[in-house]
Image: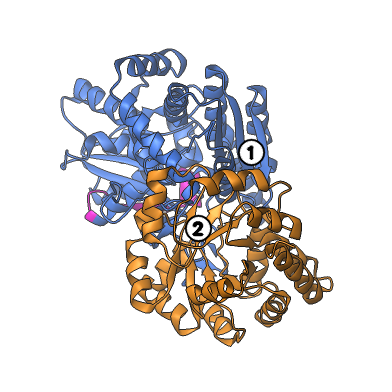
Amino acid sequence: MRIADKFRELKAKNEKALIVYVCAGDPSSEDTGKYVHALVKGGADIVELGLPFSDPVADGPTIQAASDRSLEAGMNPDVYFELAASIKEQVPLVCMTYYNLIFRRGVETFVKDCAASGITGIIVPDLPIEEAEDILKACKAHGVDMIFMVTPVTDRDRMQKIFSKGSGFLYIVSRLGVTGARADVARSTKEILEKVNTTLPRAVGFGISNGKQAAEVIAAGADAVIVGSAFVNIIASQDNVEERLEQLSRELKTGCSGQ
Amino acid sequence: MQKPTYGRFGGQFVPEVLMPALNELEEEYERYKEDPEFLRELNYYLTEFAGRSTPLYHARNLSKKYGTKIYLKREDLVHGGAHKLNNTIGQALLAKYMGKKRIIAETGAGQHGTATAMAGANLGFETVVYMGAKDVERQRMNVYRMELMGTKVHPVRSGSMTLKDAINEALRDWVTNVENTHYLIGSVVGPHPYPMIVRDFQSVIGTEVKQQIMEKEGRLPDSIVACAGGGSNAMGIFHPFIEDTDVKLLPVEAGGCGMQVQGKTAMHSASLGAGEEGILQGARTLILQDKYGQILESTSVSAGLDYSGVGPELAHLAETGRIQPGSVNDKEALDAFHELCRLEGIIPALESSHALAYIKKMADTGELGDLVVVSLSGRGDKDLETVLKVKTTASEEKL
């Protein structure tokens, strides 16, 4: 499913989007399939499926540990695409990974494999627009959205360039730092949303872990919230995982609806 | 819109949040690198604090043994015992001109961390050094040296708990504190403009060599040999000679304990010789990786060469044939270490011992020519424990 179709569908229902992240293969491909099912059942609208890299510089300790577990269990791009293809939930799947894995497979091949396995968006946290010509070309050819990030230190000129290159949604990093659950998000979200003037759906991530924060982010004007580390923490605990994922997903989705 | 690169290599593969900081760094560096006041101050620190210029020493006994005239560029005599301070004092001064209050750095064995601590203390910065927890344990003395100079040493417990992970963690700090912090990278690696800035600050090595060899010999050397991990002393000594195509430039990588890969570990650190193109820590370069692009751990008896990548400019120069990389293994490096101690009364760093070992390896081929300059990038006092351990293990094996 394409990302734009999902946002259109939500708009018709007057809903905001919940975008969730899980690291594929943590602790196994089979588990990831079940987790995605639970998350979507809870209300997740878009699923970011992380393809783990050995040196994830943009991620905090939570997601690095998940990446290590997944790699240890044998995750690699071949297995990853099989897993993606096996997910039948009716939500857009987004691949989040680091550029070396894409470069190594061949940019064109990687994007083609994404499209073939039902992935309709790609996020590459270590690929700024300056280095993205090749992947943008491949994405265009294969009908895949390339999603870029903006941050509190991105100035207006740069933002305009980023808006013009990206599609799907705009990933707004609400505060400086790496991924990971944090306490306060409302103020920084408001500040950055005031600077972001785009027709793309505005999805805010980094630090959101509960329904109250999700509600605050939506109230500040976002079209979607992105939650990763809070789910990864649940998975890491290996305690009643599916039920708790579904529960948190529901709580966040309720927050997105402003309730 | 693409930034200057070295052929296909280089670039800026970093999170969006760092792009403004890299752009700022590039602009400010372009501004100050020609600024007379900045250059005067830099020169002052290099002379009065670092102790430059360093001698170009004719190693008579070594020369005699290998039948070619060998000069050692004595970077081991720089304050701190290695060439590292050339770069840290330069970047710390730049950070001061840029109005930053805090500097952070990564370190493997602790050499770059120590050099950063020196520059940080002298120029009044809050200084934080990231170091793999394993390295912290292995290098207690260096940790203590840094702490004496007021640096906070932050042990990194993620991943393999070594240099690669320390860089990742330093990048995470920078992502978080980018507004008041300068990330002081220690080698010619990372995103543009770092490979260029570090190379320029280290070029003082080659610039001095050029002048000194003309004074002593009235001609340029036939070859220059330098060890290369990330490659900062190599780029520093090579750079002023790039256009002098009659001078052979020979980087020597760590062959570790063999050129094979075991599981997730390469038994060597020879990215130029055996690496493949990829993206690591901000740059497109030659790296040690598996078939999917996961980064392999590297191996070397010398902590300073134990790195899974190499500077992008070196990758480019190797591809174009301007430099010819070679490698020596742990044992050859250790032999060369002992040889220099005995023949010249100089204890070389294990890193530099790789360059010395290459002389021994190549002496009979005639490849080196009649006049050779070796970058003696650091002193070996820091390595005595490692050397002792290897010796003990070797004699135990004999029993």
Q: Which chain carries label 2?
A: A
Q: Which residue, given by chain and number where applicable, does mark 1 sit on?
A: B385
Given residues A205 and B286, the one toward you in this image is A205
Q: What stretch is highlighted in magenta?
A: B320-336
Cα separation, mark 1 vs mark 2, equals 41 Å
Residue B121, numbered label: none
Residue at 71% x, 79% y is A41
Image height of A28 relative to B365, above or below: below
Residue A64 percent coordinates (x, y): 64, 59
A45 sits left or right of B349 in the view = right
Given residues B152 and A119, the one toward you in this image is A119
Residue found farthest to the right: A239
Residue at 24% x, 40% y is B223
In the figure, residue A142 lies in which quadrant? bottom left
Secondary element under disc 1, as helix, strand or loop, is: helix
Q: Which residue, given by chain and number where applicable, does mark 2 sit on?
A: A125
Residue A57 seen in the current view: no
